[in-house]
Image (spheres, grey):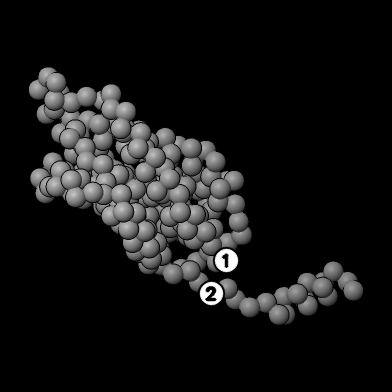
Amino acid sequence: MRTDQLIEQLARDLQPAPPLLPSYVRAGLWLFGTLAYIGTLTLVLTSEADMAANGTAWRFMAPQVAALVMAAIAAVAAFATTVPGASRQTVVLAAAAASLWIAILLSGAVQEWSHPGSATLAAPREWSCVAMVVFGGALPALGMAAMLRRGALLTPGLTAALGTVAIAGLANIGACLSHPHPSSAVILVWHGGTIATLATLAAYSSRRVLAGRPAAIRE
């Protein structure tokens, strides 16, 4: 059989691949599953004393709301980067949301540092929060990686970094709820540092982590 005949025979039975769902739909599905998982994990790890310590003060709630917004936008942006020709506006919005989260924590940290003795960064118990962010986000990370592989990995480093920010941002909320933090400075340094480190590692190893064949490259 000649090469042109083989190509013609192979092409004759090809079926068009179904297009991917829109980025925001895929992100929404992932967010729904991840919130259910991390919410259940948080409830298991949170005592009544922890819930009472959290309270509803704006200094506690504001960073959590900002982290949720950051994670949601970063998830949409991660999925959007796997679609050729898709707008990169969500990437800018994700950066803005991350900046807002940092700004809220930084504002609280400045207020704490203006009162000597009110903030301390040497908190051994914070390693349990780091573990929550790292290991609590492991299962959602597997799910997101599988979903991202169905798209076109045009910018694997950026895609992996955005996905990691989404995952770690949600796990960060679980850590804050299950292990109450009296200090914004502690959250900024420990949680922020953990998220930044994970995002950097994900971007560096993105080609190995996200290697796969796309099922479709259009929405």
Q: Earlier in the sequence, mark 1 or mark 2?
A: 2
Q: Secondary structure at mark 2?
A: loop
Foreground pick, 46 / 162? 46
Q: Is residue 45 left or right of residue 208?
A: left
What's the residue at 49%, 54% (across, down)?
142
The label shown at residue 18 is 2
Cβ–Cβ below 8 Å for labels 1 and 2? Answer: yes
What residue is drawn where x is 41% and y is 42%? 134
Q: Residue furthest right?
A: 1
Tell me: residue 172, above or below residue 30: above
Which numbered disc covers residue 90? none
* Residue corresponding to mark 1: 215
Q: Amino acid at mark 1?
A: Ala
Separation of disc 1 and disc 2 at Cα? 8 Å
Q: Residue furthest front?
A: 48
Mark 2 neighbour density, 10 Å: few (under 14) some (14–19) many (20 or more): few
- SS at badge 1: loop
Residue 36 in which image quadrant: bottom left
Q: Quadrant of the N terminus?
A: bottom right
Quadrant in the picture for residue 37 = bottom left
Q: How many marks?
A: 2
Q: Position of residue 53 (x, y in %)?
A: 15, 43
The answer to whether residue 88 is seen in the rendering is no
Residue 18 at x, y percent in the picture: 53, 74
Q: Position of residue 73 (x, y in %)?
A: 32, 54
Q: Which residue type does callout 2 highlight?
A: Pro
Residue reaching furthest top? 116
Q: Position of residue 16 (x, y in %)?
A: 60, 76
Residue lying furthest bottom in this view? 13
Q: Residue at x 83, y 75 (%)?
A: 5
The 10 Å Cα crowd at callout 1, few under 14, some 14 to 19, many 20 or more, is some
Residue 33 in view: yes
